Image (cartoon, rainbow, N blue to C red):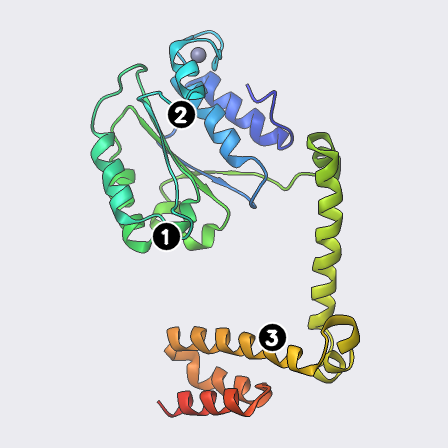
Amino acid sequence: MFDKIIGNEKSKELLEHIIRSGNISHSYIFSGTVGIGKALFAREFAKGILCLDKNSRPCGKCKSCLEIKNLNNPDFFQINSDGSSIKIEQIRGMNKNIIEKPIVSSKKVYIINDADKMTKEAQNSLLKTLEEPPEYAHIILISSNDNLLLNTIKSRCVKINFDKLTDEEIKKISPDMSKSLQDYELLSNTFNNLENINIIELLNSKGDIFKDKDDVYGVLENINLIFLNLLRKNVGAASYAARGACEWAPTTKIRQMHRNYRKH
Ligand SMILES: [Zn+2]
């Protein structure tokens, strides 16, 4: 059923078992880091749930399977973020749609991509459906950061974990991607090393990283601004944390901003 997807063999076996047994929960969280094929798994799993062939699900040939492939199956829905969030209106739309009975299959499947991008309001709205889903409905939340999901949502879903692909598996998908991965690791190591040196060393290594100290100050100012904005959102921790931020703020302007902020 997942022959064309590389990696995550244990999750494959588990999902295949669920389809074969017919013991399918109403809600799942497909959890794991970005870019490891969770959405592909979810779509194949949905095909398996909705397939009309009782002997080999998904058959890939029935009306339901073909319509999922062509993205025009009336019992199959995907909800996507607009880039930054999934809004309550989208979930309300789903809640309204889900009470309409299936048309082609005996079931309906809803996939919420980037479910961790649902706003709190959207999550609360979804919760109502998760509490009492129609008996024919199945919802799959795809998440790369479960910490952003409400506990009440998590407790109502069966979690399926997906692991990072091994280097060997990545090579199977694309030899080029393997090269990109090495570049990424090199870059990541460089940044990790930067965290371990102090500011004086950072300034002295200007030749390697930046043209001159102004560039370094520019970057540090931006980091401080981000930090300051975070503090504004988290007033409880602000007073204590702002003191630390002030001491290493690189320029008078930023130090003054921190001081002004602490007065409030
Ligand atoms: Zn089929």
If the image is split into quadrants, where does the C terminus sit?
A: bottom left
Q: What's under tag 1, amino acid-wise? A: Leu
Q: Is mark 3 within 8 Å of ligand 1?
A: no
Q: Are marks 2 and 1 in contact (CB under 8 Å)?
A: no
Q: What's under tag 2, amino acid-wise? A: Ile
**Residue 202 left/right relative to 239:** right
User: Residue drawn at (57%, 22%), measured in percent from left and top?
Assistant: 2
Q: Position of residue 251 (x, y in %)?
A: 57, 89
Q: Earlier in the sequence, mark 3 or mark 1?
A: 1
Circle 2 sits on which residue? 24
Q: What's under tag 3, amino acid-wise? A: Val
User: Residue drawn at (70%, 33%), measured in percent from left and top?
Assistant: 174
Task: Kindly identify which numbered label has been placed on residue 59.
Answer: none
The quarter of the rendering in which ligand 1 is drawn is: top left
- The front one of 241 and 28 is 241
Q: Secondary structure at mark 1?
A: loop
Circle 1 sits on which residue? 150
**Image position of 228 with respect to 86: above or below:** below
Task: State which quadrant residue 157 falls in.
Answer: top left
**Image position of 30 with respect to 119: above or below:** above
Q: Earlier in the sequence, mark 2 or mark 3?
A: 2
Nearer the observer: mark 3 or 1; the answer is 3
Circle 3 sits on which residue? 219
